[in-house]
Each structure stands twice: as structure tokens, then as C-alpha cells.
Image: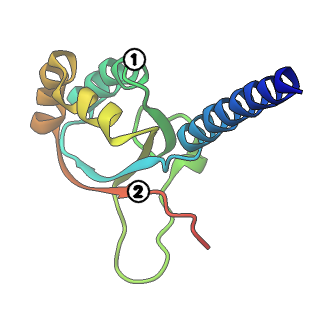
Amino acid sequence: MKSKITNLIAILFLFTISIQAQTEDSKETLSPKIFVVLDITVNDTIMYEQYRIKVEPIIKKYGGKYLVRSGGMAFDKDPDKKVIPGEGNWNPNRLIILEWNSMEELQKFINSAEYQKVAELRKNSASTKSVIVKENLTD
């Protein structure tokens, strides 16, 4: 009888640890995404294209992912990339939406030496307005 109780306690203990591990894993997968929305007015398309080409692998290296890249720039061969205005007077020259898995990943990207070096091309070729938003799916 004593060994059955000991075995039952051991099984319950292992079951509890397993449930806690699964809960921790699900918390990681359910963490809200971070989105960066950029409204960019390009003043120098040649320099901006250099920025665009150089920044893509850096974004990817730091866990970022492009969701939207619109604007109908000279280097965009697809006419469907044109921004189509909706309500109000907002008509961005170029609209970018990027996704990161966490604010920490985004901060690592922003503060990286690689990005800081390339960011000068953007600053010298375009004016940028941006916002950072966190996914909120708590309906």
C-alpha cells in the first residue's frame, strides 16, 4: 500500500511538472507580436534603394519580417504595390509594416551596429513617421 501511494505521488508530481512545462511553452507561443508601421516620404530614390537592399538582411537577422511594402517606387516593378488611400487625407508615399516576435528582438535590431550604420542612408534619403504597436487579440 505504501509503495502504491509513493508511486501515485511520483506520477502526480511528474504530471504537474509536465502541465507546467506545457503552460510555459504555450505562453511563449501566445506572446503578442510587435508591429512597426512606417509612413515614408522618399526624397532620393537611388539612396533609398541602397538602404532598402542593405536593411533587408539585417531585419531578417534580428527576427523581423516584412508584412507590407507598398509605394510604387521606381524600383518596385509591381504596379500593385501602389498605396491606395482610404478615408481621410492620409496618402503615404511608401508604407511599410514589419513584424517582430517581441519588443526585445525589435530593440536589438534598432540598437545593432549594423542597422545604425545603414539607417543613415534612410535618414539622408527620406523622411519617416513611425509607430510601434503590440498585437492585441483579447476579444
Which image quadrant: the N terminus? top right
Residue for point 56% across, 43% down: 27
Name the residue type under label 1: Lys
Dot 1 lies on which element? helix
Which x, y percent locates residue 26? Answer: 63, 41
**Is residue 54 visible in this depiction of the protein?**
yes
Dot 2 lies on which element? strand
Whether the residues at callouts 1 and 2 have beta carbons within 8 Å, the answer is no
Q: Residue furthest bottom?
A: 88
Of circles 1 and 2, the one toward us is 2
Residue 61 badge: 1
Left or right: residue 112 versus residue 31 is left
Q: Going from the N terminus, do you reach mark 1 or mark 2 first?
A: 1
**Is residue 96 visible in this depiction of the protein?**
no
Name the residue type under label 2: Lys
Which x, y percent locates residue 50? Answer: 27, 22
Q: How is the image coloured?
A: rainbow
101, above or below 138, in the image: above
User: Label 2 crowding class (10 Å Cα cut-off): few <14, some 14-19, many 20+?
Assistant: some
Residue for point 48% across, 37% down: 66
User: Label 1 crowding class (10 Å Cα cut-off): few <14, some 14-19, many 20+?
Assistant: few
90, above or below 73, in the image: below
Residue 21 badge: none
Residue 134 badge: 2
